[in-house]
Amino acid sequence: MTATSELDDSFHVFDTTLRDGAQREGINLTVADKLAIARHLDDFGVGFIEGGWPGANPRDTEFFARARQEIDFKHAQLVAFGSTRRAGATAAEDHQVKALLESGAEVITLVAKSHDRHVELALRTTLDENLAMVADTVSHLKAQGRRVFVDCEHFFDGYRANPEYAKAVVRAASEAGADVVILCDTNGGMLPAQIQAVVATVLADTGARVGIHAQDDTGCAVANTLTAVDAGATHVQCTANGYGERVGNANLFPVVAALELKYGKQVLPEGRLREMTRISHAIAEVVNLTPSTHQPYVGVSAFAHKAGLHASAIKVDPDLYQHIDPELVGNTMRMLVSDMAGRASIELKGKELGIDLGGDRDLVGRVVERVKERELAGYTYEAADASFELLLRAEAEGRPLKYFEVESWRAITEDRPDGSHANEATVKLWAKGERIVATAEGNGPVNALDRSLRVALEKIYPELAKLDLVDYKVRILEGVHGTQSTTRVLISTSDGTGEWATVGVAENVIAASWQALEDAYTYGLLRAGVAPAE
């Protein structure tokens, strides 16, 4: 279904995650994946979603057929991608051009050669025939009622080699009726000053409406995109989270955030910018890649503050160390607790966790010293909020939060003559006045400990049945003791509605794992609203 946008046509946000972004190493999208991502992008409010190359492979052909039937686009128009006609033929008889029309897409992006060497070496045709291929294909598609964008592949490299021919390709596309001609930095080698000069010159010399497509090989794709806008481009091509071939494309999210928040351009429907963090993470889940924690605007660390100096200023005014209000992009400010923390960090973190420290300077001071002492021993609380909250509550209440008392535990790994292995753990503990002994096997000593702790506690605390250990990290801390070096373990646990991290440190990896597991279960019961033991 055709989308009806509340925005005018003066500026385009064009997403190519499903086509160019899918070329990233490690991304392999099914048709269902592409449909899911298209829904997310439409929900975000981009104007155009390039869905792929119909006719080039069965998957993209199926995607366009299903998208027409299954997605009710509210904001975006679906775009089909393909190339200009073959040399020596006509657009009307070219099978690939026919496939573009048969896709049903109302908007078509054509890729055209704009670098003279590519024309002669890759297409193996003449420069004049290439211009005819561009003009004929655009004219034919326009005559069929389609809107046409033209991607000038390798434009900036071509402009450097033969500027007059590169501009001739732009003129051929524009004069044949192309709505926008996109200047592509296909190799990603340009820098902002170069983009600025070339875009301004092309606009002045051709009169065409131009867009920008920037790869990130110099780390400048977002800057190059915004520089092109400064020079007069009114169409930006990006991918979600910067996915793309080699090191990627211009990242959709910082480009859009900059346009709306820094340039004052409304390029998304009202209110959609606040969905940006959610959309970024949702698409990362679909492509099965961990969201980048340090991505601008949407990363979990984008508004995370660690230094005590920063925290002191933020306590007075958050804007002193933040370039925008994180809520504008659907993110949140986070305070990290570490050995760099001061009083302000602890007070703000307590407030974030819903713990009223009541202006108790002695309490805050004790927590600061306790954190510094523990981090010196190898603990890390910036990555283990749950363990920090348990520490904070213990200091505030004068005693640790306890749901069970451990008498002892042990883990055994057995190597057998046939080459197989057995891992068994036994836990002895007290809970609600009852002594419990539980033994379980696992696929490793830590897994066996986790299972034995579950066996021991789940009858008394059925809430623990929801818990899943979702991540386990081990780091050997710097030292000179070889195999006796201190080990730090971080465990992430989920109850289906949220996730938390806990930390353990010991010279023994199993002992460090036990500490993190004990904190994980304790915090899980706290989250579930279970009252601790007296």
Image: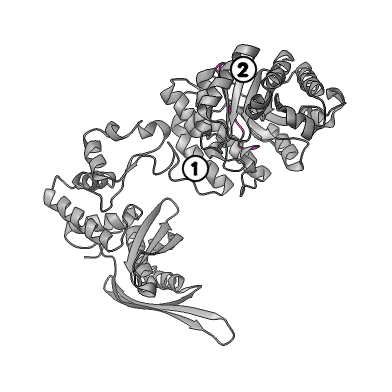
- Quick one: SS at disc 1? helix
- Quick one: SS at disc 2? helix
Q: Label 2 belongs to which residue?
A: 202
Whether residue 108 can be seen here: yes
Q: Residue at x 23, y 41 (%)?
A: 309
Q: Position of residue 353 (x, y in %)?
A: 28, 47
Quadrant housing the C terminus: bottom left
The quadrant in which residue 31 appears is: top right
Q: Amino acid at mark 1?
A: His
Quadrant housing the N terminus: top right
The boundaries of the magenta stretch are 7-19
How many callouts does the rendering have? 2
Q: Position of residue 378 (x, y in %)?
A: 31, 62
Q: Label 1 belongs to which residue?
A: 281
Q: Amino acid at mark 2?
A: Val
Please indicate whether residue 259 sits to the left or right of residue 337 in the image. right
Q: Main secondary structure of the magenta part?
A: loop
